Structure formats: structure tokens, C-alpha cells
Image (cartoon, rainbow, N blue to C red):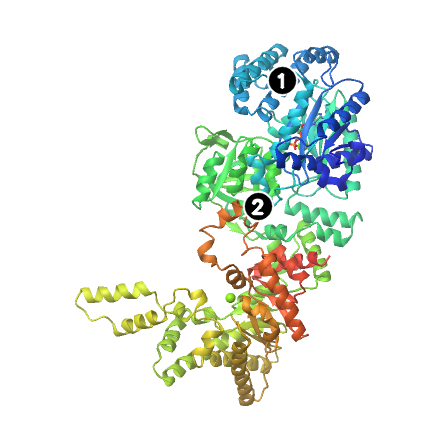
């Protein structure tokens, strides 16, 4: 028989898949002896069964009843018991944290009868009715589907009528009135009554939490965070403890370190006389934990001790939800906390130094994405404009965008490619789409633990929260800021998530401290030192080499400063552009061999100079030069453009320029319906006489020049778009002929390995044959993705990729993250069969994927020798190649 329900005593953190992160960690804290209110967990397995069939799985309710009875016996009271009720919370919690995306119902077990009992035993009528109104509100919206805004409206009306600034100023009879109002709201909206039976409340709440797995915002959050859709949520049922029992009670959120900077020391917010939901929702302003130390030093010290226990136990930053009931501290949740990239590097390094974790573990705790974020530019603080406000720096980075005041507007403008900043008094889980769409989030209320802050940090989005200088009027679509400045919707503002500053207008950007370190080695602060350590360790453990895609000496030099060990792809295309276009035109239009040779001869010294420069910048390291790849008409003027010019000349009775007529004829001759699949790559070299020879000569002469200058040039010649070994054989013969020729002419022998790009499925599938002629393979995963899927990136990304991502055809664009199943399989085949034919075959990747963390792990797995990526991704690739090797 399957088991669906587990007691806190039975679980532990390793069971997160079954019990959800929240349940598993509550069990773990129970085992550690921390004060956790008792309870039990309905497993994700039950949820999956329920979502699949729409029915409660058989046996589940009996198990729930059994565990409830045990809980009741332990506590000595029955759920909803009239004179002294046991109340429970029913809490969602999936394997991966989805903050606030699913539902939780508190105070289950209250009804018209037990509310009186609760009032009597607690000695506080206000508390009893406050709990009841919370239950009816949460249950009404979560379980019965009433729009929560209706409850909020009733609350606002009541507060206005009582001139109460917040809920604390409502008394017991106000709250009792609110309960009745909520109940009639439910009746009007649903035609049903709020259920008085505690057992029914419990059962229905559990099912509602199951269903909240598929709530719209939860689905969106999962897609965004790449959490699988089929995991389901567990449900934790737990005895309530009360933070709303008066001024000596309260609820709070804490981090064992500052999640924004990583600085050690307890960090968080506390809200006296409140239940937990109030802290993150921002209904009232929370106070810093330092204030708790003053209010209730004993509980504060306990919290600090427990925080330390947890951090030592999890060996990582933890976040904590706690409640104090009349001076007694209760732990309600913990998990390894989300943090900024800064904090991730700082904390990992510090934990290594403290000896809590090893260097490998420290490296595992940081990520290439985080490093990329640290490399983003910062605001130029010497050029800031008018300061609008200063808030809490909750998630770092510099963002510029037009102020918008609701999620829908943010989504609308972002869809039209406008950069926006979402400005809210506070955010709720319903703001998620707008947060995804925005460059930054700015709120008037809430601290580092508010919803906006937690979600933004998780997404790596810039966030400033609790900016008290601003007052948001969402309805009027504007906010007022410092000195009474009014900012209307659409006004561009700049948000600095590292300092908390908000400026009017677009502030210019400068290099970040991490970027300065990468450029110059300057270790300006502790975060940069942490980055340096992580990169050093990655370099010491990684097996993959990292090269860069660089077409110019400047790029090659920068890549080298960033740690590149060579150029994995030097594209020669740009060497045919600009002023040289005329020469290329002449070559294409040449009628005689002599004409063509003249044009090629003019290009030769220009190309040689380029190659010499790159070889010099990468002296001692390999430089893989790809022969010309794109179709030649890309170097000719636009067809329509020419036709229009000629027509214009004719219309005015003039003779069109002969050159134009000639060009148009050439363009027409070379026109292709599918240039991507047309005359390009090796095909060009095989049909345009002299093209390969000229390029190889330029490379070879560059090598000779560098050798004579006592350099150590290592050029490798790469033939693009090969599909059959015969193509490569022919191209290679030409290459070798020219290399030998140049060697003989100059008296300096030139050895350049000759290899090919693997970017056609046929090449991958016949890799064993191709390796007979290739000394190296470089996977051109951009083209290989296009030719494997049969779609061209330029045509599909805008056309249907977002639909495909929505429909789940792929979890990420195959142009960003390598499609392991299809394209990856071709890579694997080619590596295996290529190596079988030629054991010393060198293999690498030079597509965009070479800088993508997930793809890098795959390339490590299949045993490539190197990845090559754009210079700016080189540090990211070094780090991820190190992590892949752990
Ligand atoms: P979320 O996943 O949105 O954080 P939780 O299940 O953690 O939802 O519940 C939100 C808050 O409700 C908690 O932070 C806690 O303060 C409060 N809460 C949950 N269960 C209890 C309980 N048994 N007693 C008191 N407060 C609770
Ligand atoms: Mg929680
Ligand atoms: Mg290609």
C-alpha cells in the first residue's frame, strides 16, 4: 500500500522530493530539536495522484485522520473543539521553493462556536476574531475561489469608517463584523456558506493547496525558473502558534547572513502582533530585527542561536520564518536562502575560510550566471542626475527604464521592446508577469525579505524596495518622490539595486568592479577577491580549455586578459567588408583570371596584416582561422536598392551607370532562395578559383612574419560547412599546396593543422570518414542546431519561439542551451567516431553554446578538449568548466 502522509518525526531534508522543501526542512528542524509546532505532511505523491485523476487518492483521507488524531492527542485538544480549539495551518511546499506562488491557509478549525472558546482561553476576544477573519478571508479566496480583492475592499472600508490607520486599530467587534461581512460576501459570490465543520475545512484546504500547484502564477514561475511541471506540491498540516496574541507576540523573517551582500550576522524583519503572512505582504511596516532584540531579548538570543545551529547544519545561508507567541519562540520554516550573485561569491569564500565547506563545494555554490551578472556595468556615480529616492538595496545591478505602475502595463510595453521599471507600493505574487517583463522593481514598502525582494533576487532582477521617499498612486499612474517631484508613467528612471538609489532620467554606465578586476587584475573589494578565488579554483580543476571567438587583435587581446587559452574561432568575414568591399566586388565581377588574381592580390596584404595582429595577441596559443563562410552576395549591394537606382536613372531619361547594371546582373545571378543552405562554406572555396589559396597564403605569410619576429604563432586552418570527406580532401589539398609553397618561398616551413567545422548532420554522421582528413573538429553548434532542427534562427525566434516555450516544446531556446537529445547526440556520435578513426583528434565547440553554462557541462561530459565563446563569456566559461569537473 502506498503511504501518503508522514509525521515531522519521520522526515528529513533528503526527502524534499516527497515532502516538499518546506515539509522536509520542518522535519529536519524537528530532528535537530528546534522548537517546531508539531504536524504532518501529505506527500507530493498524493498531489500528483490527485491532479492526475481529479480525485483524492484512495486511503489518503484515512491517513490524514489518523495523523490528525495523533496530533490532537499530543496537543490534548481536538481540531476546532468548541471550548479550546486546536487550530492548524495548511501549507503548500514543493521540492523547489516557489515563494508565495501557491496557497497556504491559516487558522483552520475556527467556526462560530470555537471562536468564542478561543476568545475565552486566550483571554483576548480581539485575537480570536482577528484569527477568524483571517481564516474566512484565506479560505474564501483560496478554497472557495472568491476574488481576494473583495475582502480587501471590505477591510479598507471598515478601516476608513473607523479612521484606523492599520488593522491593529480595529477592535474585537469590528473584526466580528468583518467576519460576518466576509461570510455574506462568500454566500453572494458562490451561493455556498463558509463551512463550519473543521474536518471539512481541513479536507478542502488540502485539496485547494494541491490545486494551487497549477495556479497561473505558479505555472509562470516554474517556466521562468525551469522547474518541471509534474512534481506537484506537498501539504504541511501544522499546529498553529499565534503571533497575533498581543504586543508580546509577533512574526518575522530572518536570514543567517545578509542575502544582498553576504555579510555575516542575523538579518531580517519583525512585525509585532501579526501573523506571518503580514510580514511579507507589507500590510504594515516591519521593523529590523535589532528592534526585536530590544523588545524581547530572550527570544532574540534564541533566534540567533537557532540561526547559527541551522547555518552550521546546512553549511550555508539559511532563511527562517518564525513566530513569537507570548514570549515563546517558534520556528516555522527554514531553507537554504536565495541570495544575490555578490552574496553567493562572498558567502562561498567565507564558508571555505571558516572551514565549513571545501574549495570544491565553494565553487559548486557559485555560478557562471552570477559571475555574468557581476560583470554587468554599474551606474557612473559621478554623473547621477536628480535623486528621487533611496530605498533598501535588495537585488543589485543597474537598470534604466520607463516607470510603469501595474503588471499588465509592464508586460504590454516590454512586448513592444520598451524597457520598463515596475513601481508598486508593494508587490504580490500576481505581479509576477510584470516583474519578469521589467528591468527593475521599485517598491515603496517592505524590506529585504519582502515579496518583491525575494522574488527579484531569485530572478537576478534589479530591486530597490521600501523606498520611503516615494508614494505610489497606481490609479493615477504616477508617484511622488523626494522634494515633491512627481513622476508620471512613462518617465525614464534609473534604479541602482546595489546602493538603493533611484534617479530621474537615464544615468550613464561604467565598468563594474568585477570587470575592472578581469581587465586589470585589481582586487577592489571582498566580492572581487571572492570572484578571483573561485576562478582560480575553477582553473585548477577544469579539464576543458577555454578559448575565445575573436576576429580582431583587440578582441583577442581582451579575451587573453580574461583568461582565454587561444582563439577557437576567427571569422574572416569582416576582413572582406568596409573599404575592402570594392576589392571583393572586383573579385566577384572578374571576367578573366587575370582580373580576379589582381583583386585577390590586393586583398592579400590586408588579410595578412589582420592575421599577424591576432597571432601576435595570442602568441603561444592556438588561433583557429575559419576560411570564408558566408555566400558571396552578402558582400554585394542590396538587390532592391540597385534595381531602384537603375530604375530612377532610367525614369529621368539617363543611362544607368554601367557598374550598377553589371552589379545587378551579378546579384541576380547569385540570388539564392535559401542562402543558409546555398553556395557557402567549403562549397565556395571549391568553385571560386583562388579564394582558398589567397586566404591560406595570407595566413601562412602571417605565420612566417611572426616566426621571424621570434613569436610563437599557432595558426589552425578550419574549413567550414563540410558535409562529405571528399569536400574536405579537396580543400585540404589546396591548403597544403599553398602552405608548402609559402614555406619554400620564404625558407620558413609552415605547419598548420587543418580541420573542419562539424555543423551539418551529415558531417556528424560520417565523422569517422571526415576524421581521415581532419586534424581537429570544431562543432559549429549554431549551424548544427539550425540544420538539425531545419529552422533558421533569424526566421524563427520572433515567429514562434515564445509559443514553443509556452507550449513546452522546449524548455529553453536550443540556440541558447544545447539540445542534448538531438543536436547533442550528433555531437556525441561525431566525437566517438572521430576519435575512433583518429585518436589524437582535437575537438572543441565554437558556437554560441560554448559560453552557456548548461551546455558547457554537456561538452565536459562528452569529453571535448575546449569550448570557445565570445571574450566576455570567457570568465563564465572558465568558472562553469571548473564546476563541470567537480
Ligand atoms: P509561503 O510558502 O507563502 O511562505 P507558508 O506556508 O510559509 O507560505 O505560510 C506563510 C506564513 O504563515 C508563514 O511564514 C508563517 O508565518 C505563517 N504560518 C504558517 N503556518 C503557521 C503555523 N502553524 N502557525 C503560525 N503561523 C503559521
Ligand atoms: Mg513561508
Ligand atoms: Mg556555421
486 over 315 or under it: above or below:
above
Q: Which residue is mark 2?
A: 397
Q: Does dot 1 land on a helix, a strand or a loop?
A: loop
Q: Residue at x 70, y 48 (%)?
A: 346
Q: Residue furthest left?
A: 653
Horizontally, is 596 left or right of 272 in the view?
left
884 vs 515, nearest the viewer:
884
In the picture, residue 102 is in which quadrant? top right
Tags 2 and 1 in contact by the CB under 8 Å rule?
A: no
Residue 772 versus residue 320 in the image, above or below: below
Above or below: residue 527 compared with residue 8: below
Q: Which quarter of the rendered picture does the C terminus lie within?
A: bottom right
> Does residue 171 appear left or right of residue 692 in this picture?
right
Q: Who's the residue at 51% across and 70% down the image?
A: 721
Circle 2: element type: loop
* Nearer-the-camera pick, 219 or 581: 219
User: Pointer 1: what residue?
Assistant: 195
Mark 2 residue's CB less than 8 Å from ligand 1: no
User: Mark 1 or mark 2, which is nearer the start of the sequence?
Assistant: 1
Residue 414, relative to residue 327: is it above or below? Answer: below
Label 1 beta carbon within 8 A of ligand 1: no
Ligand 1 falls in quadrant: top right
Cα separation between marks 2 and 1: 48 Å
Q: Position of residue 727 (x, y in %)?
A: 52, 77
- Give the quarter of the image for residue 834: bottom right
Q: Nearer the viewer, residue 414 or 525?
A: 414
Where residue 205 sits in the image (x, y, percent)? 65, 26
Residues packed near mark 2 inside 10 Å, few (<14), some (14 to 19) or many (20 plus): many
Image quadrant where one finds the N terminus: top right
Residue 318 seen in this snapshot: no
Q: Where's residue 364, x and y in %?
A: 71, 52
How many C-alpha atoms fall within 10 Å of the one at disc 1: few (<14), some, or many (≥20)?
some
Amino acid at each position: 500500500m502506498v503511504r501518503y502522509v508522514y509525521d515531522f518525526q519521520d522526515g528529513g531534508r533528503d526527502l524534499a522530493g516527497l515532502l516538499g522543501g518546506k515539509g522536509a526542512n520542518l522535519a529536519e528542524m524537528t530532528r535537530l530539536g528546534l522548537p517546531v509546532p508539531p504536524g504532518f505532511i501529505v506527500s507530493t505523491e498524493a498531489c500528483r495522484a490527485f491532479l492526475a485523476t481529479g480525485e483524492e487518492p484512495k486511503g489518503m483521507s484515512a491517513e490524514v485522520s489518523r495523523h490528525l488524531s495523533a496530533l490532537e492527542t499530543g496537543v490534548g485538544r481536538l481540531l476546532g473543539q468548541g471550548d479550546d480549539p486546536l487550530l492548524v495551518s495548511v501549507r503548500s511546499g514543493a521540492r523547489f521553493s516557489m515563494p508565495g506562488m501557491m496557497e497556504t491557509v491559516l487558522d483552520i478549525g475556527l467556526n462560530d462556536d470555537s471562536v468564542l472558546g478561543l476568545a475565552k482561553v486566550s483571554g483576548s476576544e480581539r485575537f480570536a476574531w482577528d484569527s477568524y477573519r483571517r481564516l474566512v478571508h484565506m479560505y474564501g479566496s483560496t478554497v472557495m475561489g472568491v476574488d481576494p480583492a473583495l475582502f480587501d475592499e471590505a477591510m479598507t472600508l471598515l478601516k476608513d469608517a473607523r479612521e484606523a490607520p492599520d488593522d491593529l486599530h480595529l477592535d474585537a467587534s469590528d473584526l466580528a463584523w468583518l467576519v460576518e461581512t466576509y461570510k455574506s460576501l462568500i454566500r453572494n459570490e458562490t451561493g455556498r456558506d463558509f463551512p463550519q465543520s473543521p474536518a471539512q475545512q481541513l479536507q478542502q484546504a488540502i485539496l485547494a493547496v494541491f490545486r494551487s500547484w497549477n495556479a497561473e502564477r505558479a505555472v509562470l514561475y516554474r517556466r521562468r525558473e525551469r522547474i518541471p511541471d509534474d512534481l506537484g506540491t506537498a501539504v504541511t498540516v501544522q499546529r498553529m502558534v499565534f503571533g497575533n496574541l498581543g504586543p508580546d507576540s509577533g512574526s518575522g523573517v530572518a536570514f543567517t547572513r545578509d542575502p544582498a551582500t553576504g555579510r555575516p550576522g542575523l538579518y531580517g524583519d519583525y512585525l509585532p502582533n501579526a501573523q506571518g503572512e503580514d510580514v511579507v505582504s507589507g500590510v504594515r511596516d516591519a521593523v529590523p530585527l535589532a528592534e526585536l532584540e530590544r523588545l524581547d531579548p530572550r527570544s532574540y538570543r534564541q533566534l540567533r542561536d537557532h540561526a547559527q545551529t541551522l547555518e552550521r547544519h546546512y553549511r550555508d545561508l539559511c532563511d527562517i520564518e518564525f513566530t513569537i507567541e507570548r514570549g515563546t519562540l517558534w520556528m516555522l520554516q527554514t531553507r537554504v536562502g536565495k541570495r544575490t550573485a555578490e552574496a553567493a561569491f562572498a558567502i562561498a569564500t567565507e564558508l571555505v575560510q571558516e572551514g565549513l565547506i571545501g574549495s570544491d563545494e565553494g565553487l559548486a555554490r557559485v555560478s557562471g550566471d552570477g559571475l555574468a551578472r557581476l560583470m554587468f556595468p554599474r551606474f557612473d556615480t559621478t554623473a547621477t542626475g536628480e535623486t528621487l529616492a533611496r530605498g533598501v538595496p535588495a537585488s543589485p545591478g543597474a537598470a534604466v527604464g520607463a516607470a510603469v505602475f501595474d503588471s499588465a502595463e509592464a508586460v504590454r510595453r516590454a512586448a513592444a521592446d520598451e524597457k520598463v521599471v515596475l513601481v508598486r507600493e508593494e508587490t504580490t505574487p500576481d505581479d509576477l508577469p510584470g516583474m519578469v517583463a521589467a528591468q527593475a522593481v521599485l517598491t515603496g514598502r517592505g524590506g529585504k525579505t519582502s515579496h518583491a525582494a525575494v522574488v527579484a533576487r531569485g530572478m537576478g532582477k534589479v530591486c530597490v524596495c521600501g523606498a520611503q521617499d516615494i508614494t505610489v498612486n497606481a490609479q493615477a499612474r504616477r508617484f511622488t518622490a523626494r522634494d515633491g517631484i512627481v513622476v508620471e508613467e512613462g518617465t525614464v528612471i534609473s534604479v541602482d539595486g546595489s546602493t538603493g538609489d533611484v534617479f530621474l532620467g537615464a544615468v550613464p554606465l561604467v565598468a563594474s568592479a568585477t570587470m575592472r578586476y578581469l581587465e586589470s587584475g585589481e582586487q577592489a573589494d571582498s566580492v572581487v577577491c571572492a570572484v578571483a578565488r573561485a576562478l582560480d579554483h575553477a582553473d585548477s580543476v577544469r579539464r576543458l580549455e577555454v578559448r575565445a571567438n575573436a576576429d580582431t587583435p583587440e578582441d583577442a587581446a581582451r579575451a587573453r586578459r580574461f583568461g582565454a587559452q587561444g582563439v577557437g574561432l576567427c571569422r574572416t568575414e569582416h576582413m572582406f567588408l568596409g573599404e575592402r568591399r570594392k576589392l571583393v566586388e572586383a573579385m566577384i565581377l572578374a571576367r578573366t583570371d587575370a582580373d580576379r588574381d589582381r583583386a585577390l592580390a590586393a586583398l592579400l596584404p590586408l588579410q595578412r596584416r589582420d592575421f599577424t595582429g591576432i597571432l601576435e595577441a595570442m602568441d603561444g596559443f592556438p588561433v583557429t582561422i575559419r576560411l570564408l563562410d558566408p555566400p558571396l552576395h552578402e558582400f554585394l549591394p542590396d538587390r532592391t536598392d540597385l534595381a531602384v537606382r537603375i530604375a530612377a536613372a532610367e525614369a529621368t531619361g539617363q543611362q544607368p551607370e554601367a557598374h550598377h547594371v553589371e552589379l545587378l546582373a551579378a546579384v541576380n545571378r547569385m540570388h539564392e532562395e535559401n542562402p543558409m543552405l546555398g553556395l557557402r562554406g567549403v562549397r565556395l572555396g571549391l568553385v571560386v578559383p583562388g579564394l582558398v589559396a589567397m586566404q591560406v597564403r595570407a595566413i601562412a605569410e602571417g605565420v612566417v612574419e611572426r616566426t621571424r619576429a621570434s613569436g610563437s604563432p599557432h595558426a589552425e586552418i578550419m574549413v567550414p560547412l563540410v558535409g562529405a570527406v571528399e569536400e574536405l580532401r579537396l580543400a585540404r589539398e589546396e591548403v597544403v599546396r599553398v602552405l608548402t609553397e609559402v614555406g619554400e618561398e620564404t625558407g620558413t616551413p609552415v605547419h598548420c593543422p587543418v580541420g573542419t567545422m562539424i555543423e551539418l548532420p551529415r558531417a556528424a554522421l560520417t565523422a569517422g570518414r571526415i576524421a581521415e582528413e581532419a586534424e581537429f573538429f570544431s562543432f559549429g553548434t549554431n549551424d548544427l542546431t539550425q540544420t538539425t532542427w531545419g529552422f533558421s534562427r533569424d526566421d524563427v525566434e520572433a515567429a514562434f519561439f515564445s509559443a514553443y516555450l509556452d507550449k513546452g516544446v522546449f524548455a529553453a531556446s536550443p540556440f541558447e542551451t544545447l539540445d542534448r537529445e538531438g543536436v547533442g547526440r550528433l555531437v556525441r556520435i561525431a566525437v566517438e567516431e572521430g576519435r575512433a578513426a583518429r585518436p589524437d583528434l582535437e575537438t572543441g565547440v565554437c558556437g554560441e553554446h560554448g559560453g552557456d553554462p548548461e551546455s558547457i557541462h554537456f561538452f565536459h561530459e562528452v569529453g571535448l578538449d575546449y569550448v570557445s565563446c565570445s571574450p566576455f563569456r570567457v570568465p563564465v566559461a572558465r568558472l562553469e568548466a571548473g564546476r563541470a569537473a567537480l
